[in-house]
Image: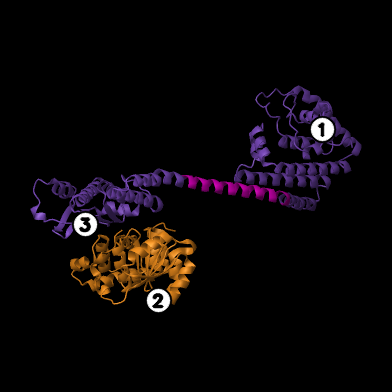
Chain colours: A orange, B purple
Amino acid sequence: MAEQPTEHLDPAEARPERLRVFLVDDHAMFRAGVRAELGAHVEVVGEASTVAEAITRIASVGPDVVLLDVHMPDGGGRAVLEAMRRTHPQVKFLALSVSDAAEDVIGLIRAGARGYVTKTISPDELAAAIRRVADGDAVFSPRLAGFVLDAFAARPDAPVADPELDQLTNREREVLRLLARGYAYKEIAKELFISIKTVETHVSNVLRKLQMSNRYELSRWAADRRLV
Amino acid sequence: MTREPPISTVTSPPRLYRAPEHRMAAGVAAGIADHLGISVLRVRVAFMVLLGLSGLGLLLYAAFWAVVPLRPGDTAVPPRRDVAQLLPFVGIGLGVLLIQVMVFDSVGAAGTAGWLVAIIAVGAGVIWHQSAPERRRQWGEAMPVPWLGAVVEESDRRAFVLRFIGGGVLVAVGIIGVAAVYSPAQNFDAVINGVIFALVGLAGVGVVAAPVLWRTYSQLRSEREGRIREQERAELAAMVHDQVLHTLALIQRNAGDVKTVQRLARGQERSLRNWLYKPTASPSERFAAALEQAAAEVEDTFAISVETVVVGDRETDEKVGALVAAAREALVNAARHADVQTVSLYAEVEPDQVSVFVRDRGKGFDPDTVEDHRHGVSGSIIGRMKRHGGRAEIRSGPGEGTEVRLILPISRDSSAAERNR
């Protein structure tokens, strides 16, 4: 799955220091591969292969972005996210997984990941995604946008407890649709006659709503999708 | 008392069989006689005499019948029962009963002793019966009466419950009977006491049998779990063998050919993903499955990757089938002409329309300059959508890539029915 390509790199490239990136994955081969591929773009400051190791090492190293595998023994990326989110809010998490199953993607996003990419991503696109996440932006793959649309479209007539929180605005849906169609942020901005910054705001709002949706909504969503 | 009843043979190592050759009823007496090496007549007379002890003879006979297997190998030719010979023994039994009533005037100490021995015999039989599950199974098959086999066999939970209730009722009725016989009938308390004793007796049997039952149950459960695990493993192994190993072999053989390797890896990834995460649906029935199948075909044929996102789903009909065909044509065009590695395919099922978007970031073209004889776009996409009440737009420009938008309105009725499904 390809991420939104690289037209939005310029502000990050202008940054003087290189981003400090931490890898969490239980496959040493994969860590070595990512380290080699990313070496030119970012600084890999540490690696961990288990949840416990990740929690202690991230706390001591303090990276900008953590690349997080979803499926690991002892709870996987979600356990790391839940442990770190309170204590280290400045660390950004980007999920990097071989799985693009809906429950994995949405679960990680709800736990607080700023983005989700699959392991088939190209090194350049991964570097771009890391920069976007480090800048506080959300990384949405077309597939993730599809999942979100699917989740919110599943019950159009269902009563919503808190519309402000749980419902996507029409504009946000529009942006998600274009994302799902494979448009880049720049192209979305052109299509909707808004600025790139506005597109990013919409996307970030969607992400925030996903994370802050209440427990009831989450369990209903999962039940609808027969995930639980 | 007359003679020791052959109870001890019940608890001894079971080489005791019922004899099918010269039997009168079930071959119990003949079997015991064979086993002990004494004459059949003496055993039968012993049973009849034991009948005098409050029917102990009959009880013992029934117990033996239930737990002692028919001698194996002989079951194929069941010989005739010698019914005529039963008569004298029935006569003896009646005589014994008569004498007992006359001598003891009623059931007394002898009767109590008889019942005690009977209960011990049955208890011993139960314990022995529980001790060898595989042997028990054989008896189940050898049982002459099917329901008796169902009672003794531990086939399923229903049989267990049935047996438990039946046994409980039997024990209760028996003890109530004892109480009624031994105490004057007008004393109702005695019956109540009898019931209480029955419950106590049941609890005792339960305590004796529970560990064995529990062991059997947990054995069965772990056996079943193991079987299920084994089955899943076998299925996974078969899938890995059929697909993954073959793909890896092909990749090794085509290591130099980047395109082939990519195509093989992509196809394998797709099928593994489907196997791991996706519920299976028939492409001829569901829109999403049909579209994904079309995308997979294009991926395999042209060695590109199609990034498929489908939101919602519905059943297919003729119009939806045409939409899928048009989308496939758009994918083929993108794969053939755009000169890209990745094509995006997005489909959304909404209450009143189904839309499909096929987008690439390739060379693009000027739609106005497409020559008339190129039927791919005009016939297969635009024309097809028009014929089925939809529409197609193509947005493209040199260097900007191409997006094909396919919109198919659907009637409210059918979509409402679809959602209420």
Circle 2 marks a residue in which chain?
A
The residues bearing labels 1 and 3 have C-alpha atoms spaced at a distance of 95 Å
Mark 2 or 1: the one toward you: 2
**Residue named by callout 1:** B47
* Cα gap from disc 2 to disc 3, whole angstroms: 38 Å
Q: Which residue type carries mark 1? A: Phe
Whether residue B5 is visible to the viewer of this picture, yes or no, is: yes
Looking at the rendering, the stretch of residues picked out in magenta corresponds to B207-234
Is the N terminus of chain B in the top left, top right, bottom left or bottom right quadrant?
top right
Does the magenta-highlighted stretch encompass residue B154?
Answer: no
In the picture shown, does residue A106 fall above or below A10? above
- Visible in this render: residue A105? no
Residue occupying the point 69% across, 51% down: B211
Q: Is residue B418 above or below residue A103?
A: above
Q: Which residue is mark 3?
A: B360
Q: Which mark is residue A89?
A: 2
Q: Position of residue B386 (x, y in %)?
A: 16, 49
**Which quadrant of the figure has residue B95?**
top right
Numbered disc 3: secondary structure: strand
